[in-house]
Image: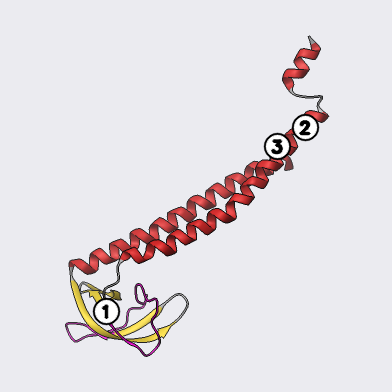
Amino acid sequence: MSLAGWPRRLRQLILFLLICLMVSCAGMIVGSFLNDRAINANMGEAIANVRSVELLRTTVDFVDDNGDFQSPPTGLLYPVGLEEGQRVRVEYDRLDPNVVRVAGRAWTLSIIPAGSIAVVGLLVAAPLWWLSVRATLRSRRTSEKVNGGSPELRNELEN
């Protein structure tokens, strides 16, 4: 393949990455909904101690209804605004105490971050798409000048 086809390949790559991004954003929302549904179906409540607040995970410790100590390895759902050492009410799935959220928060909180990620992805992709379309048009114009115009024009001149 020649270098002349790079704008088309760039558009294919952009489209592929945008589809992956949109599927990921939808997965964030659907995953949050499914976790909340599991918690609501078999809810346990407890007071948890916020052990650490990191960029990607907030960890908590709590004692479940059976008296077992729980410290979910994946962290807490919807941890915005929490601080290390804070005590917070949590709701968890009794069948899987690793699925735990801050009490009163719901899957709808995932819509804004997922939507923001999608919008940023589109804002990054749009100029790249525009540049690839512009490069395609430029290469067509150059090709037409080098080859003596469009095929239709050449056919008319030859006849």
Is 15 rendered above or below residue 31? above
Is tag 2's residue or tag 3's residue first in the polypeptide sequence? 3
Quadrant of the frame with the N terminus: top right
Q: Which residue is mark 2?
A: 143
**47 relative position to 132: left or right:** left
Looking at the image, which residue sits at the far top? 159
Residue at screen point 64% across, 46% down: 130
Q: Which residue is mark 3?
A: 137
| Residue type for callout 2 | Ser
Query: Which type of secondary structure does the marked residue at label 1 adopt?
Result: strand
Residue 112, given in percent of the width and then of the height, sits at: 41, 63
At label 3, counting other C-alpha atoms closer than 10 Å, the crowd grade (few under 14, some 14-19, many 20 or more) is: few
Quadrant in which residue 96 is drawn: bottom left
Residue 47 lies within the magenta run: no
**154 relative position to 10: left or right:** right
**124 relative position to 5: left or right:** left
* Region of the chain picked out in magenta, as a range: 62-89
Report, in whole angstroms, how far the alpha carbon at label 2 lies from the one at label 3: 10 Å
- Asked if the residues shown at circle 1 and circle 2 are in contact, with their CB atoms under 8 angstroms apart, the answer is no
Residue at screen point 60% across, 45% down: 11
At label 1, counting other C-alpha atoms closer than 10 Å, the crowd grade (few under 14, some 14-19, many 20 or more) is: many
Report, in whole angstroms, how far the alpha carbon at label 1 lies from the one at label 3: 57 Å
Residue at screen point 79% across, 34% down: 142
Residue 109, given in percent of the width and then of the height, sits at: 36, 66
Q: Tell me, what colour scheme is on the image?
A: secondary structure
Quadrant of the frame with the C terminus: top right
Q: Mark 2 or mark 3, which is nearer to you? A: 3
Q: Which residue is mark 1?
A: 90
Report, in whole angstroms, how far the alpha carbon at label 1 lies from the one at label 2: 65 Å
Residue 18, given in percent of the width and then of the height, sits at: 52, 51
